[in-house]
Amino acid sequence: MFYTPSSKLPTHLILRNQLRQVFFPFLGIHLPRPPQLFPSSPSSEASSKWLDAHYDPMANIHTFSACLQLADLHGDGEYKLVVGDLGPGGQQPRLKVLKGPTVLSESPLPALPAAAATFFMEQHEPRTPALALASGPCVYVYKNLRPYFKFSLPQLPPNPLEQDLWNQAKEDRIDPLTLKEMLEGIREKAEVPLSVQSLRFLQLELSEMEAFVNQHKSKSIRRQTVITTMTTLKKNLADEDAVSCLVLGTENKELLVLDPEAFTVLAKMSLPSVPVFLEVSGQFDVEFRLAAACRNGNIYMLRRDSKRPKYCIELSAQPVGLVRVHKVLVVGSNQDSLHSFTHKGKRLWTVQMPAAILTMNLLEQRSRGLQAVMAGLANGEVRIYRDKALLSIVRTPDAVTSLCFGRYGREDHTLIMTTRGGGLIIKILKRTAVFVEGGGEAGPPPAQAMKLNMPRKTRLYVDQTLREREAGTGSGPGPHL
């Protein structure tokens, strides 16, 4: 098909243009392409929503979504990226602060980071948020990127049998080999786990045991738990810059709510298993709801006055991510699927993914009132869902292991991703971009999930059904005995 100019041109000019399009390619002359007459495909429309701001495959950032935070750390309107970096191979963990594509500051951490959060501690001016980083048994609080406070988890009571054995070793009443055998028996049967000192002793060779016992037998037994997850909870106001409390999940199957000023424990709640993901809503002084996804494959719901879970959502697989969208919980499982639940445990929908889910986070576009779920997959895709409708697919050169969306620098809507190989990808959402349902793969129609408004059974209908049942007994076809 030829590109035909306007019909208002003379006939000889139209023929000349058509002859050029036929014979010029044979002479090696290529004419410029005419303007595109048809709209672009859906895939190109999806990719055009984002501007490629930065891509560095050698950024050497190894982290996950819980350790990524965007915050105005100095109160100057310039939002920076805070990264709790695990380091290559889990070695040399560091706290990194990025401004644009460059690292602004970097400091070592004593242990691997578990989560990062920014929160307001007080109402004093200037209003600058504090940075909390959970690492090991401690929470390190920074203000203006300087160390401000260190909170340590309270110590746990040791196992009394373990304490008695170390007391005997202190008095030289048992030898190191007998101590090892007794500690192994306690580890297998006792409900209270052993201390770090005893666990290290059990890993030693026979030749190293005596020196270890002589070095540590005079020290008191200390059993310390570690932090597994962390989030923030508003204290008494729902404003964006309101004072917030830190909520910690520990390896000891507990949830702790900390006071934002004195860093004392305001509330303690127990769980049947170790929490790995937390989502909260409400205010601590008024009413709040807390959802904790645990290692036993369940999600537990707690409220302000409950010391133990009020509801339980049993999953068919282990959770790999938890995001709250308005009043709905969206959880990703290791069976490559997204599930949506209410706070009372009612399942709303399920969407199957084409690959394993590596990470999840919330995409919130406040100017358009949009809240959606981002899921990073093992096939290099980042899928964005509102409810179960696929809004967009972002394809990356490598599998994404962490996601963060928000204001970065002076841009309100920035998507930050880190990859499995340590790369950093920054994309900016266009101001004219609009997410439209059905922009991705087609799924079941929305009407399929709607319940039919069936009329109630009347008394007349019930009586007529009973009469037909009684009169129709033995009147069917076939021989009757």
Image (spheres, helix red, strand yellow):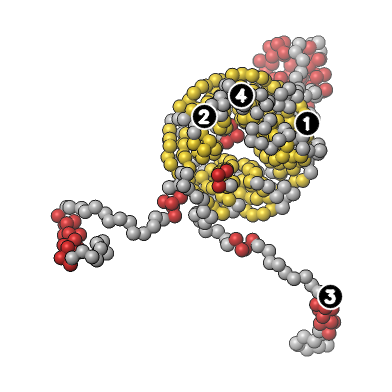
Residue 340 position within the rendered picture, expressed as x and y whole percent measured from the top left: 65, 50
* Residue closer to the observer: 162 or 255: 255
- Of mark 4 and mark 3, the one earlier in the sequence is 4
Amino acid type, residue under disc 2 in the picture: Glu
Given the image, on which type of amino acid does mark 4 rest?
A: Pro
* In this view, 221 is above or below 358: above
Q: Amino acid at mark 1?
A: Ala
In the image, taking residue 157 as reference, residue 332 lies left or right, namely: left
Residue under circle 3?
A: 459
**Alpha carbon separation for disc pair 4 and 1:** 29 Å
Q: Earlier in the sequence, mark 4 or mark 2?
A: 2
Q: Quadrant of residue 53?
A: top left
Distance of mark 2 from mark 3, alpha carbons?
69 Å
The span from disc 1 to disc 2 (Cα, nearest Å) is: 35 Å
What is the CA distance from the residue labelled 4 to the residue labelled 3? 70 Å
Which residue is at 49% across, 36% downward?
Answer: 411
Residue 110 image point, x, y percent: 61, 20
What label does residue 267 carry, if any? 1
- Observer-nearest of 458 and 169: 458
Q: Secondary structure at mark 3?
A: helix
Marks 1 and 3 sit apart, C-alpha to C-alpha, by: 54 Å
Q: What residue is pinned by disc 4?
A: 126
Characterize the local packing of mark 4: few (<14), some (14-19) or many (20 or more) Cα atoms within 10 angstroms.
Answer: few
Residue type indicated by callout 3:
Arg
Q: Are marks 2 and 3 in contact (CB under 8 Å)?
A: no
Mark closer to the chain start, 1 or 2: 2
User: Which label sits in the foreground, 1 or 2?
Assistant: 2
Helix, strand or loop status at disc 4? loop
The mark closer to the camera, 4 or 1, is 4
